[in-house]
């Protein structure tokens, strides 16, 4: 570890807290419950391009729901509506029954936390791995510095990156970046976590490792998970329910088994492709 | 009709841009109240702007002061008034050349880097990530950069003024055509210059620093379209900063006369 870098980190994030041992957290950080999501008649256009057409979707608390479909069908746009990164032209997104478009600071006022893992990982290059993971905790002053360092360590361990706090993000592989992004999201202890194309740009081994990380989270933490992906095996393996989008609409929704058995020609064409699809199940 | 339509569209685009810049400025200034808890970030930006630009700013200022002394001194010598060179170089460096030259240097070196950095963050979803972490991007990115520039650019300009004046003094002393001793040069300069001139120069560089940071962040936030978009933003930020610095320089000079 670079001693000057370490000294700077301590100076920046609390040198004194090491001595007084501020191992406390604000009320409300502990515990995580899933949230219910209801999307009603959601529409969004960019110019003449009608990207989302009357989307209706309901997700139960603690459920893992994947949204699959070919590229350019509006999956990521739908995801960004749920976290208010994009405003809808019409329709509603209700989280725990509250319309998020009518609430200014949704995390604060609706008493739940959400976080999103972006397709590009979206790590901050100017910060180390540990600083990325602890960014929200430090910026919001959720916990004392000692506790923040413990949370960073625990979440990096969860995603299989123990002891990598001091590494720079530029030194990480694509799979490691993804896992740091997940650790950063988990550090918020969210009730809702959204993954945008989590396996994009990953090799099959890294994808498999990521699937195991998400699966173990699903087993240990009762959070609502939404995954947008065109990686079929990944989505079917992890999800309680899968929704298929085509041309801005949800054309089918069901359990992985129901999706595999769907007779909808678009779904069948998407699933049973010759090169990357899954093997058709015989009745 | 089509021509009028094009003019109107361009005008509306410019008006929208001006409106967006003013709105961003107001939001950035609003977050000044959060500066005490962002001191690390502000000092980090100050060190990038100040320490990184200091050597080149001093080198450029030294040669500008020397050239100014050579050209002005030799002309003054023809009329036997070369002793006024101290006042001319001093006033020029402090009121005009120091602030403007330093600001243009910072705009090219730091403003473009700011636009590229914030633009890359915009393109690669890092700004969206900040929003999902409930961190206001203006507070986290624009406010520390603006505050850092407001202080670092005048500091750089002050160094540039001193070095430029010294460079002019050395040339005036050693150049046989001018032949004005350094003590005469210095006395002449001090007589012509008061606190008002120095404050004018520092105030100007503070405004220019604000322009550089604000333009860099605004252009960065508006970046779209991948690597090409980032490149375009870099160029646009330099051009817009240069333009606004020149306009502001004229307006401030008129105001402070």
Image: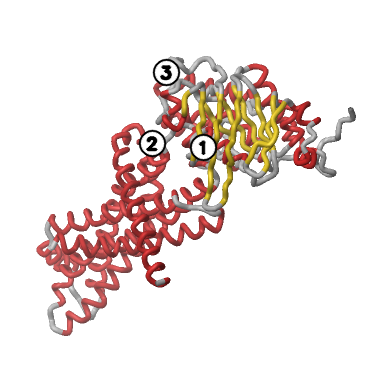
In terms of secondary structure, where does tag 3 sit?
Answer: helix
| Residue at x 42% of width, y 24% of height | A108
Side of B39 relative to B169 (left or right) = right
Side of B144 relative to A226 (left or right) = left
Residue under numbered circle 3: A19
Q: CA distance from mark 1 to mark 3?
A: 33 Å
Looking at the image, which is closer to me, B188 or A11? A11
Tell me, yes or no, whether dots 3 and 2 are on the same chain: no
Residue under numbered circle 2: B40
Residue under numbered circle 1: B129
Residue A52 horizontal/vertical position (percent):
58, 42
Q: Is residue B218 above or below residue B182?
A: above
Q: Tell me the subunit letter for badge 3.
A: A
Residue A172 horizontal/vertical position (percent):
63, 39
Tell how many labels: 3
Looking at the image, which is closer to me, B244 or A166? B244
Q: CA distance from mark 1 to mark 2?
A: 21 Å
Tell me, yes or no, whether dots 1 and 2 are on the same chain: yes
Q: Are marks 1 and 3 in contact (CB under 8 Å)?
A: no
Question: In the picture, which quadrant includes the N terminus of chain A?
Answer: top right
Q: Is residue A7 visible?
A: no
Q: Within 10 Å of the Cα at label 3, are there few (<14), some (14-19), or many (20+) other Cα atoms?
A: few
In terms of secondary structure, where does tag 2 sit?
Answer: helix
């Amino acid at each position: 570890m670079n001693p000057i870098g370490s000294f700077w980190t301590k100076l920046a994030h609390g040198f004194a807290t090491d001595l007084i041992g501020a191992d406390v957290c604000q009320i409300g950080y502990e515990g995580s419950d899933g949230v219910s999501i209801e999307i009603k008649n959601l529409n969004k256009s960019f110019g003449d391009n009608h990207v989302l057409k009357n989307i209706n979707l309901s997700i139960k608390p603690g459920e893992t729901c994947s949204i699959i479909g070919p590229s350019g069908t509006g999956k990521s746009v739908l995801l960004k509506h749920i976290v208010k990164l994009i405003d809808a032209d019409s329709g509603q997104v209700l989280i725990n029954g509250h319309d998020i478009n009518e609430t200014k600071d949704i995390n604060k006022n609706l008493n739940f936390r959400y976080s999103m893992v972006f397709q590009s990982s979206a790590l901050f290059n100017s910060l180390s791995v540990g600083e990325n993971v602890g960014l929200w905790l430090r910026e919001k002053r959720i916990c004392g510095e000692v506790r923040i360092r413990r949370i960073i360590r625990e979440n990096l361990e969860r995603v299989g990156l123990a002891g990598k706090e001091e590494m720079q993000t530029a030194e990480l592989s694509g799979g490691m970046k993804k896992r740091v992004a997940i650790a950063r999201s988990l550090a918020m202890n969210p009730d809702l976590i959204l993954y945008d194309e989590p396996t994009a740009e990953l090799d099959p081994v890294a994808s498999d490792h990521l699937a195991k990380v998400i699966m173990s989270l699903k087993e240990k933490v009762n959070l609502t998970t939404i995954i947008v992906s065109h990686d079929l095996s990944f989505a079917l393996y992890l999800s309680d329910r899968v929704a298929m989008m085509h041309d801005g609409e949800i054309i089918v929704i069901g359990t992985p088994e129901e999706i595999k058995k769907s007779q909808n020609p678009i779904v069948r064409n998407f699933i049973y492709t010759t090169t990357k699809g899954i093997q058709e199940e015989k009745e | 009709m089509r021509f009028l339509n094009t003019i109107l569209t361009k005008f509306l685009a410019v008006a929208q841009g001006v409106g967006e810049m003013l709105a961003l400025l107001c939001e950035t200034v609003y977050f000044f109240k959060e500066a005490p808890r962002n001191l690390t970030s502000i000092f980090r930006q100050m060190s990038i702007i100040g320490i990184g630009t200091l050597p080149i700013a001093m080198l450029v200022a030294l040669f500008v002061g020397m050239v100014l002394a050579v050209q002005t001194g030799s002309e003054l010598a023809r009329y036997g008034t070369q002793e006024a060179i101290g006042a001319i170089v001093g006033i020029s460096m402090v009121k005009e050349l120091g602030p403007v030259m330093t600001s243009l240097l910072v705009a090219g070196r730091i403003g473009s880097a700011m636009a590229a950095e914030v633009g890359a963050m915009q393109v690669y979803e890092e700004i969206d990530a900040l929003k999902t972490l409930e961190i206001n991007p203006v507070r986290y990115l624009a406010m520390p950069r603006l505050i850092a520039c407001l202080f670092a650019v005048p500091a750089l300009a002050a160094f540039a003024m001193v070095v430029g004046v010294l460079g002019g003094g050395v040339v005036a002393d050693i150049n046989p055509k001018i032949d004005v001793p350094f003590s005469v040069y210095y006395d002449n300069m001090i007589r012509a210059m008061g606190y008002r001139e120095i404050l004018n120069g520092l105030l100007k560089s503070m405004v220019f620093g604000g322009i550089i940071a604000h333009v860099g962040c605004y252009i960065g936030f508006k970046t779209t379209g991948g690597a090409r978009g980032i490149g375009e933003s870099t160029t646009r930020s330099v051009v817009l900063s240069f333009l606004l610095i020149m306009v502001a320089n004229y307006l401030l000079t008129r105001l402070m006369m």
